[in-house]
Amino acid sequence: MIVLAQILTALLMAAVLTVIVTVVFRRHRHTVDAVVFFFVIFLATWGGGLWLRPYGPTVYGVYWFPFLVVAFIVSLILITFIPRRPPESTEEAREMIERRRTLESVFSIFLVILIVVLILAVVFGYAAA
């Protein structure tokens, strides 16, 4: 039962932060970007909430403060990688597209490694408990 509450806590925090970043800051142009953002925030929140020392009040037996701290910090880090402004000229747009393609190839490898590490953090978090 507590595992379900931890998953729901991580899901809720990841969903709220994804909506804030997507709607308020208008940072994600494609749905895939928002889904990847949500998935990374969710896994990081879930794993970090398991590994950090329990602190603060509980809701359904879950100390939600460590989950919140991890979700907030990871989302701030990920926001820095999202482009901020549209290109001003066609030349700049072409350069941005080329840079984005290069970054996507490097970032996709990093993202796969990050997701595997986060999944392992969740698995070993429950194994250690």
Image (cartoon, rainbow, N blue to C red):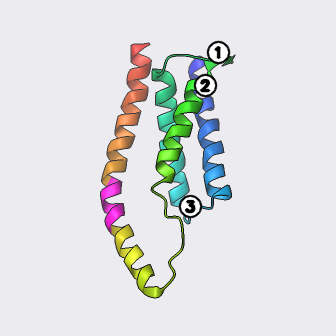
Q: Callout 3, which amino acid? A: His
The front one of 107 and 81 is: 81
Q: Can residue 126 be seen from the camera position used here?
A: yes
Asked whether, in this view, residue 57 is left or right of residue 120, the answer is: right
The residue where tag 3 is placed is 28
The C terminus - image quarter: top left
Q: Callout 2, which amino acid? A: Phe
Badge 3 density bin: few <14, some 14–19, many ≥20, Cα 10 Å:
some
Secondary structure under the numbered disc 1 in the rendered image: loop
Report the magenta residues as a range.
102-108
100 is higher (above) or lower (below) than 50: below
Secondary structure under the numbered disc 3 in the rendered image: loop
Badge 1 density bin: few <14, some 14–19, many ≥20, Cα 10 Å:
few
The residue where tag 1 is placed is 61
Badge 2 density bin: few <14, some 14–19, many ≥20, Cα 10 Å:
some
Toward the top, the furthest residue is 129
The N terminus - image quarter: top right
* Image disc number at residue 36: none
Q: Is residue 39 magenta?
A: no
Asked whether, in this view, residue 99 is left or right of residue 78, the answer is: left
Between label 3 and label 2, give the one nearer the viewer: 2
The residue where tag 2 is placed is 65
- Give percent across and percent down for residue 66: 55, 25
- Give percent across and percent down for residue 70: 52, 33
Q: Label 3, label 2: how many angstroms apart (C-alpha)?
A: 27 Å
Who's the residue at 63% across and 58% down the image?
25
Q: Label 1, label 3: how many angstroms apart (C-alpha)?
A: 34 Å
Q: Is residue 106 magenta?
A: yes
Q: Callout 1, which amino acid? A: Gly
Who's the residue at 31% across and 67% down the image?
102
